[in-house]
Image (cartoon, rainbow, N blue to C red):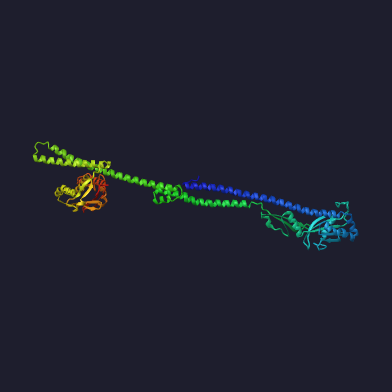
Amino acid sequence: MIKLKTIYERVILLLSISAIIFLVLFTSMYFYTLIQEKQVFDSAQHQFYNEVESLLDLNSESMRIAANDYTSSDDLVEFTKSRSTKWYNEHIIGAINSLKVDYICVYDTSFNIISETSSLKILSRRFIPQNAVSAMKELRFSNFFLVTTEGLVEISAASIHPTFDRYHNKTEPSGYVFLARLWDQSFKTKLSKITSSKVDFQEIPDQKYNIDHNILSVSKNLSSADDKTVSHIVFTREFNLNFKTSKSLLLITVISFLLGMIAYLVYARLWIYQPLNLITQILESENSNSIKKLQQSAGEFSYIGVLFEDYFNQRKTLELAKQKAEESDKLKSAFLSNIAHEIRTPMHGILGFADMLKTASLSTEQMQEYITIIEKSSARMLNTITDLIEISRIESGQTEINLSLVNIDGQLDSMYAIFKPEADKKGIHLKISISTEAEESHIRTDREKLDTILIQLLKNSIKYTKKGSVEIGYVPKGKYIEYYVKDSGIGIEKDKQNAIFGRFTQADNSLSKIYDGAGLGLSITKAYVEMLGGTIWVESDPGSGATFYFTIPVEGGK
């Protein structure tokens, strides 16, 4: 059993079976047409032969009847004896027209010519072969052909008897009469009209008529007195009732079918095999070039190519989403770890030092030191919880914008006053850059959120700067104010500069082990900047510090 692996092979097999059935059918029809054509031709040929046979027999029969009637005559018997010139002139010469012959010759019983006469068509004399004359003694009747100077003639001969001996079998012959008719052009024309055919005399009949089914041909041998063929009379007639048109149509149909098969194979490969092969390649290797080629295919395959493209795009999207979800899961795990550390550390401080305050032997100074530690730990834990609550409000869309007129120079002065002690404590030089133009120092924005942004950026810069300076300032940029906070701290790697603004992220999670913080400050900062209608970014190189920039609209947020 044939094993077919592909759809294309199955289609080709079905097509091959159909083609074989079709060709067998048309071959059978073609050979049946040939058989029918031969049968019709043979029938017409046979009918034409019978027609010619009957016509020639009828023509010869008229000659025989004329010879028989003319020789059954008492007057003719008497003439063979008297040889009367008068009777000859009245009956012999006149018989040329009445009998419609071209030559009459009368012999006596010694086979000597008594008289002969002819029409103007035959001028030859004494052309009857002697053996044909001698044979009349026994035959009494004879019909044969011979060739004369004037052409082919048909001769009918009979012995002369009295009138009562009509069948020439009761008395001995008194002589012999030979009647001749010339088969000239006028005679052939007459036969042509009667038979609706062309008539020719040939010594050897043309054999091509035997194989040409467009022509009916009948050839009759014309024999001499000694049964030797002297000539052939050939009748030819066009035969238009053939199957040439039917055979041509069958051949054209077969050729058209074969051409159609070739075209089908070509286009089946182009429209079926190649698209299916492309689909196989896509499923095996997910080749994008194969998808583009499939989209250029005809019919439904083009739509399948679009579906493949959509499917792989969706899968890539899902893979990216999965990757992001996994990364987010890792970040959340790190965040929870940081949160646990941020809460557990101050909580341990609070619980530990609160328990130590129960000791009665503590001095006043020790008690104040422990209380201070408890206060700092509480503040740290409170800040962590506050950040969590705020990021939750931002993500749920509960944070609102409250616009008011803000003096940004005064605001920067406040920031300087707040962070100056902390900077001095770490040995960091804190600088401030304030605009000297009063009209540019007021904007309409949310004071509280702008304060939070500046506080968070300054806090980060001071936290990650061990030595050097931290500078805060702004530059008017048309409808926007561009703030900056520049430090000489540890810096941020290029590939992590976008990640620091994400939820639950520090530039390096390991920093949470060195520097306090859950990694929510910059994400809150970014959310506030965008709420106020601005953008935030950072420029930094590792070990060379970092500069944070953000813009705020002069007039009222988004």
- Between 137 and 437, the residue placed more toward the observer is 437
User: Residue at (18%, 42%) from the top-left corner?
Assistant: 380
Q: Is residue 139 visible?
A: no
Residue 169 in percent (x, y) is at: 86, 52
Q: Is residue 555 visible?
A: yes
Residue 491 in percent (x, y) is at: 22, 52
Residue 15 in percent (x, y) is at: 52, 47
Residue 217 in which image quadrant: bottom right
- Between 219 and 297, the residue placed more toward the observer is 297
Q: Farthest residue in the right direction?
A: 82
User: Residue at (20%, 42%) from the top-left corner?
Assistant: 383
- Between 169 and 185, the residue placed more toward the observer is 185
- Between 396 and 7, the residue placed more toward the observer is 396
Q: Is residue 437 above or below residue 344?
A: below
Left of 169 or right of it: where is 557? left
Left of 510 or right of it: where is 305? right
Residue 321 in which image quadrant: top left
Left of 182 or right of it: where is 357? left
